[in-house]
Image (cartoon, helix red, strand yellow):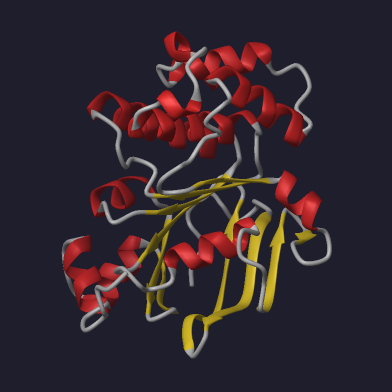
Amino acid sequence: MAEPEGTAARPTVLRVSELTRSYGAQRAVDRLSFSVQAGEVLGLLGPNGAGKTTTLRSIAGVLPLQEGAIEVAGRDLAREEVEAKRRLAWVPDDPRPFEALTVAEHLEFTASLYGVGDHRDRGRELLERFELAERASALGSELSRGMRQKLAIAQAWLADPAVVLLDEPLAGLDPRGIRGARDAIRDLAAQGTAVVLSSHQLDLVEAMADRLLVLSSGRAVFSGTLEELRAARGAASLEEVFLALTDGESEAP
C-alpha cells in the first residue's frame, strides 16, 4: 500500500497489532492491526456494531487489553500504561464532564493530569476558540450537549498529545461549532499530532482523512487512501463504496 504523499519520513506514533476483544461469545474486534503516522488523519469507518468504539476504547485504555498489543509514541500500553496515556487524548462520542467542576477547572485538572506546565494562556486561547470563555465558571452539570463536546475537545488539545482519538467529534455541535472543530482538527494534524477520526458523517471523513480504515464485524475490510478505495471498488462516492464494503453488516448497536 502506498504511503500518503509527504508522510514517508514521519514517525509512526500509534501501532495496533492483532487487537482482539470479545464480549462473552461475541468477538467485537478480531485480530485488528494498523498504524498511524505523526500528522496523519486516519478515518475509521464502519456501521454500528463493527467494532469502532471498542477499538478506540481499547487504545485509550478504557477497556483492558485481552489480546494483542498497542503502542503510543513508542510506549507499550500494557507495560507502560501511564506513559502511553500521557501521549494520548480521547474525545468520546458523548463526553461526561465532572458535574461539580467548572469549565476552567476541567482545564486545570487536565493540565495537572498530563503534567502541562504553564497552561493558563493556552487554556484561555482554547476557551476562546471553542466559544467557552463566557462559560468558564459554569459547572459541568450545566453544560449542553454541544458545550460538553467542545470542552472535551479543548481538554484534548490542551494536553498536546501525540495521538488523539475522536469518536463522532461533531455530535451535538451547531454549524459554527462544526466549522471550528473541523479547523481545529486540521490544525492539530498540521502540528504533527496523529488523529484517528471515527464518524458516520462520511462527508467529514472524506474531507479530512489521509487514509481510511473500514471495519466490518470487527475486522478490517479495507485500509488505504480514498483514491485506492474508489479504484478498487469502482464507485465514485465514499457512501457507495462504504455500503458495498459493509453490505449485510448488522446495524444493531
Q: Residue at x 65, y 34 (%)?
A: 160
Left-right relation of 129 to 89: left
Q: Which of 215 and 82 is in front in this view?
A: 82
- Pinpoint residue 187: horizontal percent, then vertical percent: 49, 31
Q: Is residue 183 visible?
A: no
- Pinpoint residue 113: horizontal percent, then vertical percent: 74, 35
Q: Nearer the viewer, residue 86 or 240?
A: 86
- Pinpoint residue 33: horizontal percent, then vertical percent: 57, 75
Q: In this view, does 56 lie above or below 28?
A: above
Q: In this view, does 41 lie above or below 151?
A: below
Q: In which quarter of the image is residue 211?
A: bottom left
Q: In which quarter of the image is residue 226?
A: bottom left
Q: Quadrant of residue 100?
A: top right
Quadrant of the image containing the C terminus: bottom left
Mark count:
0
Q: Nearer the viewer, residue 34 or 11?
A: 34
Q: Is residue 44 visible?
A: yes
Direction right: furthest residue:
79
Q: Nearer the viewer, residue 79 or 231?
A: 79
Q: Which residue is drawn at 47% across and 11% down?
A: 133
Q: In this view, does 230 lie above or below 110?
A: below
- Pinpoint residue 103: horizontal percent, then vertical percent: 53, 21
Q: Is residue 75 above or below residue 230?
A: above
Q: Residue at x 52, y 35 (%)?
A: 97
Direction bottom: furthest residue:
25
